[in-house]
Image (cartoon, rainbow, N blue to C red):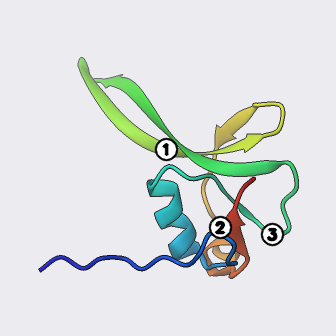
Amino acid sequence: MQHQLSLPLTTDIVDFGVALQWLRMGERVMRSEWSGKWLEITDVEYVRCGHRRNASVIDVVQEDDAFTSWQPDQTDILANDWKLAP
C-alpha cells in the first residue's frame, strides 16, 4: 500500500520537510527571512570515469538569475518558516 502525502496549502508556512517535497514537485521555495532569492532543483549531467550520469541538485537562485549550489545548514533544516517563492 502506498502512502499519499498530504501537503499543506501553498499559502502555509512550513518546515523543511514539506519545503523539500515542494522542491521535488518542481516548486520554488524560500525562507520567510530571505528576500530576492529562492531554491529550486536543477537537473545536471556530468561525466565520471567515462560514463555520463544525471543528478539533481538544489540551487539558490537570485532575482538576477545568478545561481550557486546550496547545502542546508542546521538552522535551515530546523526552521519552520519555509514557504513557496513568488
Any part of residue 16 in sight = yes
Q: Mark number for residue 32?
A: 3
Residue appearing at x 62%, y 69% in the figure: 10
View extreme (left): residue: 1
In the rendered image, residue 81, in percent from the top left (x then y), is placed at 73, 77
Please state if 66 lies on the left or on the right of 55 as rendered. right
Residue at point 64%, 81% (across, down): 78
Which one is closest to the eye, mark 2 or mark 3?
3
Task: Look at the numbered disc 1 and give the secondary structure of its residue.
Answer: strand
Amino acid at pointer 2: Asp
Q: Is residue 43 left or right of residue 82?
A: left
- For marks 2 and 1, the one nearer the N-term is 1
Q: CA distance from mark 3 to mark 1?
A: 22 Å
Residue 35, placed above or below residue 9: above
Front residue of 52/42: it is: 42
Instruction: Kindly tell me whether residue 49 is visible in this rendering.
Output: no
**Horizontal placement of 16 versus 57: left or right?**
right
Residue contact at pointers 2 and 3, CB within 8 angstroms: no
Q: Position of residue 82 (x, y in %)?
A: 69, 71
Query: Which numbered disc covers residue 57?
Result: 1
For marks 3 and 1 on the same chain, the one whose residue lies earlier in the sequence? 3
Crowding near the residue tagged with mark 2, few <14, some 14–19, many ≥20 C-alpha atoms within 10 Å: few
Q: Residue at x 75, y 53 (%)?
A: 86
- The reply to whether the C-beta atoms of the residues labelled 3 and 1 are less than 8 Å apart is no
- Residue 55, percent across and down? 37, 39
Number of residues whose C-alpha sits closer than 10 Å to that of mark 1, classed few (under 14), some (14–19) or many (20 or more): some
Sequence-wise, the earlier of marks 2 and 3 is 3
Nearest the eye: 86 or 43 = 86
Image quadrant containing the N terminus = bottom left
